[in-house]
């Protein structure tokens, strides 16, 4: 248990090797006192001594042979490793947009024309411009975003730059995040 450190683990291993049962119990009780001093937050728990004895038993691998003052509950459930997660490996056309933007553009291409599609188009276009801005400020421009939307949706969705206006937040970021020259004194 990393919260107690290597020294407590070495003390528990030493207690296991003690032959005299009474001395082994006395050593284990001392280790529990040390653990209580190391973790004062445990004192707020209702049965904190019982928790500490459970921790000593867990650290010893349940091989410490003493008369425990409390019934010991096994903590084996915490030691199980989770199953590895399946991560879908998919080729992303432009890494700066990422898989999520590609999925949004696929969904956008399937949507029927209307106000909902226009709002979603505005959200996706602003996200694309933001990711281009974060990736490479020099390569970012409105025409590139419009061309990429048309290319990803295979011409089914077009962004009309004469009527569409990107969020003003982006324009403010361009001004504030640009290179700033220091004033000479």
Image (spheres, rainbow, N blue to C red):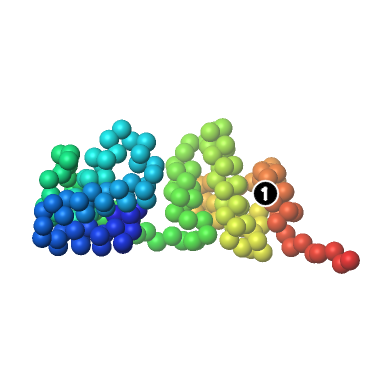
Residue 172: x, y in percent?
Answer: 72, 48
Residue 75: x, y in percent?
Answer: 20, 46
Q: Residue at label 1?
A: 170
Direction from residue 75 to residue 20 in the image, left or right? left
Nearest the viewer among 169 and 61 is: 61
**Residue for point 33% across, 58% down:** 5
Nearest the viewer among 165 and 110 is: 165
Looking at the rendered structure, the secondary structure element under dot 1 is: helix
Q: Is residue 14 visible?
A: yes
Residue 28: x, y in percent?
Answer: 21, 52
Q: Quadrant of residue 121?
A: top right
Direction from residue 87 to residue 138 in the image, left or right? right
Nearest the viewer among 26 and 62 is: 26
Nearest the viewer among 18 and 47 is: 18
Direction from residue 60 to residue 102 in the image, left or right? right
**Residue for point 57% across, 42% down:** 123
**Residue for point 58% across, 61% down:** 135
Residue 184: x, y in percent?
Answer: 87, 67
Looking at the image, residue 18 lies above or below residue 109:
below
Q: Is residue 87 visible?
A: no
Residue with the most extreme right position: 185
Quadrant of the image for the N terminus?
bottom left
Number of numbered discs: 1
């Amino acid at each position: 248990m990393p919260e107690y450190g290597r020294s407590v683990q070495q003390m528990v291993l030493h207690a296991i090797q003690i032959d005299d049962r009474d001395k082994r119990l006395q050593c284990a009780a001392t280790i529990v006192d040390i653990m209580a001093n190391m973790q004062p937050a445990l004192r707020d728990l209702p049965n904190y001594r019982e928790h500490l004895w459970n921790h000593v038993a867990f650290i010893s691998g349940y091989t410490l042979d003493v008369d425990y003052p409390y019934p010991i509950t096994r903590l084996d459930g915490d030691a199980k490793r989770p199953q590895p997660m399946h991560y879908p490996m998919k080729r992303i056309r432009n890494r700066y947009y990422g898989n999520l933007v590609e999925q949004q553009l696929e969904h956008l291409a399937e949507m029927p024309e209307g106000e909902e599609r226009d709002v979603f188009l505005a959200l996706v276009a602003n996200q694309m411009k933001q990711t281009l801005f974060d990736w490479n400020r020099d390569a970012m421009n409105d025409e590139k975003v419009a061309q990429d939307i048309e290319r990803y949706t295979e011409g089914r969705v077009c962004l009309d730059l004469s009527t569409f206006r990107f969020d003003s937040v982006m324009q403010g970021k361009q001004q504030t995040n640009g290179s700033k020259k220091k004033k000479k004194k």
